[in-house]
Amino acid sequence: MATKENAHHGPALLLPRTGRRPGASRPRLFIATGLDPSTLGSRLAATRARGGDTAAVYRAERVTDELLDLQNRYGLILVVGAEHDPRAKERVSASGLSREIPDIADREVVVAGPRPFRKYVAGALARLAVPRSQVSFTSG
């Protein structure tokens, strides 16, 4: 953070404008693939219990009753298609994510899944100017 001299009061701290109250937690985004639906459900339940604004995007090869239940209970954004399906890839690309989550650059983002998925999503997040300090990765 930068400081600047204030003629009357000494150095002043310049803080980025975030639109959030001081001390308020940053909204979160969870982007994942390859998780067992019960694991995914547990993560979504834990996130909801902490409160705040959380969105979740999950890529699956096919829709299951469990995933539909998670979609209904938590507002999970389902992306259905195989790993290399162009329609599914577009939905987790920079343009697809920005359509689904317009405030994505303001969120803490957790990306979970196999390495190629994490790498692809990391590129999308970089193109959307999501600060690297707001992004974390996990294999599952």
Image: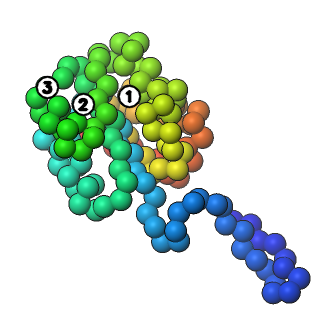
**Pick the front one: 75 or 104:** 75
Q: Is residue 123 visible?
A: yes
Label 3: which residue? 64
- Give the structural element (helix, strand or loop) at label 1: helix
Determine whether, in the image, residue 89 is placed left or right of residue 140.
right
Q: Is residue 121 visible?
A: no
- Picture quadrant where residue 76 is located: top left
Q: Give the x, y percent position of residue 38.
A: 13, 41
Could you tell me which residue is drawn at 24 percent across and 44 percent down? 74
Question: What is the crowding at mark 1: few (fewer than 14 residues within 10 Å), some, or many (at least 20)?
Answer: many
Specify the amino acid type for callout 1. Answer: Phe
Q: Give the x, y percent position of residue 122.
A: 48, 35
Q: CA distance from mark 2 to mark 1?
A: 10 Å
Q: Give the x, y percent position of residue 77.
A: 31, 33
Determine whether, in the image, residue 95 is placed left or right of residue 10.
left
Identify the mark nearer the N-term, 3 or 1: 3
Label 2: which residue? 34
Could you tell me which residue is drawn at 86 percent across and 86 percent down? 8
Name, please, the residue furthest toward the front: 72
Identify the mark nearer the N-term, 2 or 1: 2
Q: Quadrant of the N terminus?
A: bottom right
Identify the mark nearer the N-term, 2 or 3: 2
Pointer 2 and pointer 1: residues touching (CB < 8 Å)?
Answer: yes
- Give the structural element (helix, strand or loop) at label 2: loop
Question: What is the crowding at mark 2: few (fewer than 14 residues within 10 Å), some, or many (at least 20)?
Answer: some
Label 1: which residue? 117
Pointer 3 and pointer 1: residues touching (CB < 8 Å)?
Answer: no
Specify the amino acid type for callout 2. Answer: Gly
Determine whether, in the image, residue 62 is placed left or right of residue 55.
left
